[in-house]
Amino acid sequence: MDAHGMHATASDVDALALVLRLVLLSGTALVAGTGLLRPVADAPARWVSWTSGGLAALASLVSIPALGVSPAFAVGHAVLVLAVPALLRRPTAAAYAGFATAALLVAETASGHSSFQFLVDTAYTAVAVGWFGFAVHAGRLKPGLRLGPIALTAAIVLTAAAVGQLLLSGLLDRRLYGSGHGVALLLITLSTVVVLGLTGWLRRDPRRIYRFGAAGVAAVFLLWGALPAIPRPHELPLPGVPRLVHAEVEGQKRPMLITPQRPGPNLVHFPESAGKGISVEVGEHVVPAMARPGGHGTWATVDLPAGRSDVVIRRGDTTDSIEVDTGDATAPALAGATGPDGPECAGAALGGLVAGARTPLTGCPADALASDDADALRRLVGALAANGTPAVTLEADDSPRSRQAADVVRAAAAERGVAVSPVPQPEGALVVVSGWERAVDRLTLGHQYVWGVHLAPWLLHGPVLNTAASSSVPLRFDPRDQRSLAYGLTLAGAFGGEPPSVAGFGSWLAARGMAVRGPVTIYAAAQVDVMKMSMPGMDHGGTAAGTWNPKGTVVAVSAPLAP
């Protein structure tokens, strides 16, 4: 029975599961030690072995109906722990059975862990098993054994493993004093230090070392076994690293994003699934979370002080407090993270966070035009000119990226003899190179263009696409391929149905050691709500989580574009 599998997440652990786990682990360790060290004892300690083995076997069998553990595994475990006391009159056979039981215990406590964690768990389990064995046989051990050096070595290994677990948990910080997990780790470490001190104090009487130390080792082993059942605290906020946490809103945990987590203006973002009526409080300032053009869900702009502080989330009479740490007051501001292009910047940060990256946000997508995007815009203008488009209406804004993109479009159009105008030219095409907010404002005007509406690559975002009946986007990736959909599903699952964005996709890929690569192809996006059908395989007009155009479709409409 996999003891970790029984209690994979702390939030799912109940009292019965915890008791069964502790009885199973401690009883198995005692039985394993008794059998493993039987050859160095003059007589068997049968009553201790039968009692601990019986309790462990009972816990294993009760776990079948109580926890849904595999009957074959549970029965096998029960048989093995009962085999040790039955074989105690045969020292060699008992030692083999004890070794098998110890190996099973190591597998149950350390399986599925990283290499270092596996090493720490194995060391702890092995020392506990050996210590219990010496303690049980303390009055029956054969003469000539050098028990003192063995005890000292075991105590040192035990202490080293405890310190290793403390370091591994990353709790050498202020969370250590405010969480059950941290308190348990402190108790484990202190208990092992006590055992080490006792070993040095009683070094002249090794048998007393094991008898008195057994209580400390047992306490440590029980705490060690209970660790998976004790909720771990949230990760500490890191200055400059956007904060992705869950806040309790009217009894339900809802994801929220705080970006860039620097002194000064910050965006607080909630998914649409969190609902409305949420406000954000920093000190005496209360800011309601509101919708923003081009963004999904709700947003609040708040001023955070330097260093540690709390952001209070409120809806109705319920509140929740989220710790933030913006770092030193001299940290440079990141204006793009909260301005008109703030939602896109937040999307870029969110893509990295859901992929496991914890790196400071040093810039936003709208700060500069990427070379790949510039190339895609040139190819788009080239395709429009090749198809006979007489004029282009260009829509831009004041961001550095948009100004640079507008220059690229004008230069490419001039090379091909296509007129460019800032005012609507219905007989031509509309090319939008602004940010999300300006794009939504322009597209909602509903002007019709004979040669269609064409968006810059970064405008492939559901709330932007859904403001126009149809549009096209030059892309270097297929929004329907496996990677694109995997990112969309991961994002939607982690942040309440948040739709994907090109900037977020790039961050998600970068965190996984990948990048967008491929020829530029024009993809058409269209709303198809009017085509809703219930036939199998027909998903037109749906709002499937993770798709790039939740209320429509995105399909390739060209071959790879020529330079």
Image (spheres, rainbow, N blue to C red):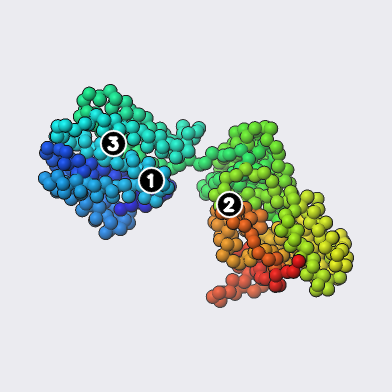
Which one is earlier in the sequence, the residue at label 2 or at label 3? Answer: 3
Up-down: is 290 above or below 44?
A: below
Q: Is residue 367 visible?
A: yes
**Pointer 2 residue:** 511
Which one is earlier in the sequence, the residue at label 3 or at label 1? Answer: 1
- Mark 3 element type: helix
Which of the two discs, 3 and 1, sits closer to the camera?
Answer: 1
**Pointer 3 residue:** 218
Residue nearest the viewer, comparing 11 with 188: 188
What residue appears at the point 31 percent right and 38 percent down from the top-left corner? Answer: 221
Which one is earlier in the sequence, the residue at label 1 or at label 2? Answer: 1
Give the position of the C terminus as an image quadrant.
Answer: bottom right
Instruction: Examine the image and state in which quarter residue 286 appears.
Output: top right
Residue type highlighted by circle 3:
Ala
Residue nearest the viewer, comparing 351 with 424: 351
Q: Residues within 10 Å of mark 3 (few under 14, many from 20)?
A: some
Up-down: is 103 above or below 156?
A: below
Residue type highlighted by circle 1:
Phe
Count the marks: 3
Q: Are marks 2 and 3 in contact (CB under 8 Å)?
A: no
* Horizontal and vertical percent position of residue 308: 60, 33
What residue appears at the point 73 percent right and 56 percent down from the top-left corner? Answer: 371
What residue appears at the point 63 percent right and 69 percent down from the top-left corner? Answer: 541
Which of the two discs, 2 and 3, sits closer to the camera?
Answer: 2
* Horizontal and vertical percent position of residue 12: 41, 49
Q: Are marks 1 and 2 in contact (CB under 8 Å)?
A: no
From mark 3 to mark 1, how far is it between C-alphas? 20 Å
**Pointer 1 residue:** 118
Q: Is residue 525 visible?
A: no
